[in-house]
Structures are given as structure tokens and as C-alpha cells.
Amino acid sequence: MSKVPYSSAVGSLMYAMVCTRPDLAYAISMVSRFLNQPQKEHWKAVKRIFKYLKGTADVGLIYGSHSDCCLTSYFGADFVVDLVKRRSLTGYAYTLGGFLVSWKKTLQLSVALSTTEAEYMALTEAAKEGIWLRCLINDLRINQEYANIYCDSLSAICLAKDQVHHDRTKHIDVRYPFIWSERRIKVHKISTLHNPADMFTKPVPKSKFDHCLSLLNVDC
């Protein structure tokens, strides 16, 4: 099988994902891992994504006015989703006044030893984006003391607030604990049912997928 059509197709999908279609983030991340040696099943997956695009041509980001321009984030992680390098997956989304302004799905740089660590490292990545976005909106004279970050992992929240060093977290000690003293973000607990970041990190049922899109104001 030629690599050219597969690479071109995935490249087009990645452009759509980055610009206007966060609902494609998880699917495209999966097929893009096989750019070097795509097989027949990978090409079938790409064609399925195009079929989905054809049926959802009227779906996109919705923006409007809102009296409360609050910067809010939702994030999640999927533990050891990369079966080759054993890395976990980070996914987060930021809304401003309820409208989606930033999202990302990426494999983590470090190997997490537990679900808690994977969620904690995802929290750190979301926090860094939140700090940058907060500075940006402050430059636009939308003053906000801190960004709100919502997480469905209580253990990750406890680890972020606990300034005690643990033997099991030494391997992530240098890069990630800056969040302990960070005052520009606040972390809150949210139910998994209402966490839209789940669609960035794992396959979800259609009902949950539609609910995630609704929470992020992605609609027709």
C-alpha cells in the first residue's frame, strides 16, 4: 500500500482537528501513529473518519456573547494507552465564557506508574496552558485572578495540593510539582459524567460523546 494517500488523508484530518473540529482529536491521534507503516485496517479507519465528516459537515464551534468571561478548563488522562512505549494520554479543553478556545490531546513525555500520576501530569499540562491563556486575556483587559480547572480524579487533586514528597513520585519530581505553589489556577472536582475532556482521551459511547460536544458548545 502506498504511504502517500494515507499520509495526505491524515494530514488533511489533522488540519481540520486543529482548526475547527475538536471532536476528531482522539480518532485522528490514533490513525496518525501509523503514518510510517499503515496497514489496510488503518486506511479503513481513515475512511470511516471521512464518512463521519461527511455526515457532520454542519458541526463546528459555536461562539457568542456572554456576560461572564470566565476561563475554565476540563482535563483527563488515560493510563498507559501507548502499549509500545507505555505512555499515558493527556487531554484538556479550555473555554472562555462557555465557548471553546483551546484544546489538546497528546501522549505524556514521562511514563506514569499509576492512574493518579497520569492524571497529575495531565493537570500540570492543563495548568501551563491556563497560565498562558490567563496572561493573554488579561492583555485583552479581561481580568481574571485565576483559571478554574476541573478534574474527575480526586487522588490527583490531593497530590497537587499535598506538598509532601513521596517516594513513588520521585521520577516526576523535577518537572511537575510547580503546581504546588501556583496561585494562578484553582483545581476543582467534577463528576466523570460531566467531564468533556473524556472524549479526548478514550472512546466514549455516543450519548457521552454528544454530551461532551454540548458542554463545549460544539454543535450544528
Image: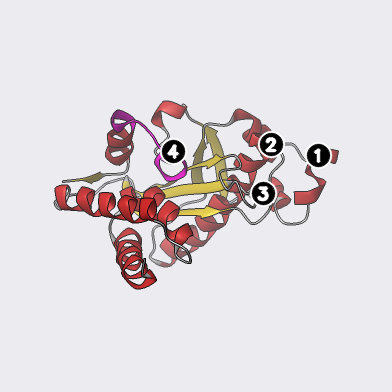
Contact, CB < 8 Å: mark 2 with mark 1? yes
In the rendered image, residue 201 lying in the magenta stretch gets the answer yes
Q: Which residue is mark 4?
A: 198
Upstream in the sequence, badge 2 or badge 3? 2
Q: Nearer the viewer, residue 208 or 162?
A: 208
Residue 64 can be seen in this image: no
Query: Is label 4 in a helix, a strand or a loop?
Result: helix
Callout 1 environment at 10 Å: few (<14), some (14 to 19), or many (20+)? few
Callout 4 environment at 10 Å: few (<14), some (14 to 19), or many (20+)? many
Q: Position of residue 18 (x, y in %)?
A: 35, 62
Q: Which residue is mark 1?
A: 168
How much space separates mark 2 and mark 4, taking CA atoms?
18 Å
Q: Residue at x 60, y 46 (%)?
A: 83
Contact, CB < 8 Å: mark 4 with mark 1? no
How much space separates mark 3 and mark 4, taking CA atoms?
22 Å
| Left or right of 92 on screen, residue 209 | left
How much space separates mark 3 and mark 1, taking CA atoms?
18 Å
Q: Position of residue 119 (x, y in %)?
A: 60, 40
Q: Is residue 59 above or below residue 119?
A: below
Q: Amino acid at mark 3?
A: Ile
Q: Amino acid at mark 4?
A: Asp
Which stretch did the figure color magenta? 197-208
